[in-house]
Image (tube, rainbow, N blue to C red):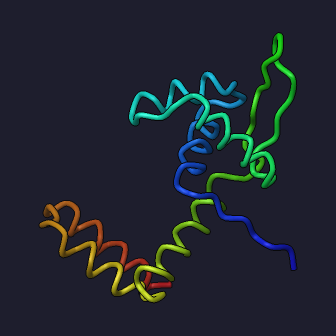
Amino acid sequence: MAKIIKPSDAETAILQVLWNEQPCSVKTVHERLGATKDVGYTTTLKQMQRLLDKGLVSRERGSGKSFLYTAAVGETETKQRLFSRFVETAFENSVSNLVMHAMSKGKPSDDEIAQIKKFIEDLESK
Protein backbone atom coordinates (compact mmCIF):
# COMPACT_ATOMS: atom_id res chain seq x y z
CA MET A 1 0.00 0.00 0.00
CA ALA A 2 1.36 3.45 -0.92
CA LYS A 3 2.26 5.79 1.90
CA ILE A 4 -0.20 8.65 2.26
CA ILE A 5 1.60 11.97 2.63
CA LYS A 6 -0.14 14.46 4.89
CA PRO A 7 0.82 18.11 4.50
CA SER A 8 2.02 20.23 7.41
CA ASP A 9 0.05 23.29 8.54
CA ALA A 10 2.21 25.61 6.41
CA GLU A 11 1.87 23.32 3.39
CA THR A 12 -1.89 23.14 3.89
CA ALA A 13 -2.10 26.95 3.82
CA ILE A 14 -0.30 26.93 0.46
CA LEU A 15 -2.56 24.19 -0.87
CA GLN A 16 -5.59 26.25 0.19
CA VAL A 17 -4.36 29.14 -1.97
CA LEU A 18 -3.85 26.76 -4.89
CA TRP A 19 -7.27 25.13 -4.47
CA ASN A 20 -8.83 28.59 -4.57
CA GLU A 21 -7.01 29.99 -7.61
CA GLN A 22 -4.62 27.66 -9.37
CA PRO A 23 -2.33 27.68 -11.23
CA CYS A 24 -0.26 30.17 -9.23
CA SER A 25 3.29 31.44 -9.17
CA VAL A 26 5.27 31.48 -5.93
CA LYS A 27 4.82 35.25 -5.93
CA THR A 28 1.03 34.96 -6.04
CA VAL A 29 0.95 32.34 -3.29
CA HIS A 30 3.30 34.46 -1.16
CA GLU A 31 1.08 37.54 -1.61
CA ARG A 32 -2.05 35.59 -0.60
CA LEU A 33 -0.33 34.13 2.48
CA GLY A 34 1.11 37.54 3.38
CA ALA A 35 -2.40 38.96 3.67
CA THR A 36 -2.97 36.91 6.84
CA LYS A 37 0.47 36.03 8.21
CA ASP A 38 4.04 37.26 8.25
CA VAL A 39 5.98 34.89 6.00
CA GLY A 40 9.13 35.44 3.97
CA TYR A 41 9.23 34.89 0.23
CA THR A 42 12.05 32.34 0.50
CA THR A 43 10.06 30.44 3.13
CA THR A 44 7.10 30.24 0.75
CA LEU A 45 9.39 29.12 -2.07
CA LYS A 46 10.99 26.40 0.11
CA GLN A 47 7.59 25.11 1.27
CA MET A 48 6.39 24.92 -2.33
CA GLN A 49 9.54 23.02 -3.31
CA ARG A 50 8.83 20.57 -0.47
CA LEU A 51 5.25 20.16 -1.69
CA LEU A 52 6.62 19.42 -5.16
CA ASP A 53 9.09 16.87 -3.74
CA LYS A 54 6.25 15.18 -1.83
CA GLY A 55 4.11 15.04 -4.98
CA LEU A 56 1.41 17.26 -3.48
CA VAL A 57 1.78 19.93 -6.19
CA SER A 58 2.85 19.92 -9.80
CA ARG A 59 4.44 22.74 -11.74
CA GLU A 60 4.89 23.87 -15.30
CA ARG A 61 6.98 26.59 -16.85
CA GLY A 62 5.32 30.01 -16.74
CA SER A 63 6.54 33.21 -18.31
CA GLY A 64 10.25 33.95 -18.08
CA LYS A 65 11.95 31.96 -15.35
CA SER A 66 8.82 31.49 -13.25
CA PHE A 67 6.82 28.34 -12.67
CA LEU A 68 3.08 27.91 -12.19
CA TYR A 69 2.01 25.50 -9.46
CA THR A 70 -1.15 23.40 -9.28
CA ALA A 71 -2.38 21.22 -6.42
CA ALA A 72 -1.85 17.55 -7.27
CA VAL A 73 -4.13 16.42 -4.44
CA GLY A 74 -7.84 17.03 -4.01
CA GLU A 75 -9.12 19.47 -1.42
CA THR A 76 -11.89 17.28 0.02
CA GLU A 77 -9.74 14.16 0.31
CA THR A 78 -6.85 16.09 1.86
CA LYS A 79 -9.08 17.83 4.39
CA GLN A 80 -10.68 14.51 5.33
CA ARG A 81 -7.24 13.02 6.01
CA LEU A 82 -6.17 16.05 8.05
CA PHE A 83 -9.38 15.98 10.05
CA SER A 84 -9.03 12.25 10.69
CA ARG A 85 -5.46 12.79 11.91
CA PHE A 86 -6.66 15.61 14.17
CA VAL A 87 -9.44 13.48 15.71
CA GLU A 88 -7.08 10.53 16.16
CA THR A 89 -4.31 12.50 17.84
CA ALA A 90 -6.17 15.20 19.77
CA PHE A 91 -9.31 13.29 20.75
CA GLU A 92 -8.10 9.66 20.84
CA ASN A 93 -10.27 8.89 17.81
CA SER A 94 -13.45 9.79 19.72
CA VAL A 95 -16.01 11.81 17.80
CA SER A 96 -18.04 12.36 20.98
CA ASN A 97 -14.98 13.88 22.73
CA LEU A 98 -14.49 16.17 19.74
CA VAL A 99 -18.13 17.29 19.74
CA MET A 100 -18.23 17.81 23.51
CA HIS A 101 -15.04 19.87 23.36
CA ALA A 102 -16.38 21.99 20.50
CA MET A 103 -19.71 22.53 22.26
CA SER A 104 -18.01 23.61 25.50
CA LYS A 105 -15.99 26.37 23.79
CA GLY A 106 -18.87 28.79 23.56
CA LYS A 107 -22.63 28.90 23.72
CA PRO A 108 -24.05 27.86 20.36
CA SER A 109 -26.91 29.98 19.04
CA ASP A 110 -30.44 28.62 18.92
CA ASP A 111 -30.04 28.30 15.14
CA GLU A 112 -26.83 26.28 15.54
CA ILE A 113 -28.49 23.99 18.08
CA ALA A 114 -31.40 23.45 15.67
CA GLN A 115 -28.95 22.59 12.87
CA ILE A 116 -27.11 20.12 15.13
CA LYS A 117 -30.38 18.47 16.18
CA LYS A 118 -31.45 18.14 12.54
CA PHE A 119 -28.08 16.66 11.64
CA ILE A 120 -28.41 14.06 14.42
CA GLU A 121 -31.99 13.26 13.37
CA ASP A 122 -30.78 12.73 9.80
CA LEU A 123 -28.02 10.43 11.03
CA GLU A 124 -30.47 8.41 13.13
CA SER A 125 -32.92 8.02 10.24
CA LYS A 126 -30.26 6.44 8.00
The answer to whether 81 is drawn above or below residue 88 in the figure is above
Residue drawn 14% across the image and 61% down it: 109
Residue 95 pos. (x, y %): 41, 84
Residue 89 pos. (x, y %): 48, 81
Considering depth in this image, is 98 or 85 the residue closer to the camera? 85
State the image quarter where residue 79 is shown: bottom right
Residue drawn 55% across the image and 75% down it: 84
Considering depth in this image, is 28 or 113 the residue closer to the camera? 28
Q: Answer with left or right where residue 56 lies relative to residue 95.
A: right
State the image quarter where residue 15 is shown: top right
Numbered label tally: 0
Residue 37 pos. (x, y %): 40, 36
Q: Answer with left or right where residue 10 lies relative to residue 91.
A: right
Residue drawn 67% across the image and 40% down it: 46
Q: Answer with left or right where residue 58 lies relative to residue 6.
A: right
Considering depth in this image, is 89 or 18 the residue closer to the camera? 89
Residue 49 pos. (x, y %): 74, 41
The quadrant of the image that shows the N terminus is bottom right
Q: Answer with left or right where residue 109 lies relative to residue 59.
A: left
Residue drawn 29% across the image and 66% down it: 115
State the image quarter where residue 110 is shown: bottom left
Considering depth in this image, is 19 or 56 the residue closer to the camera? 56
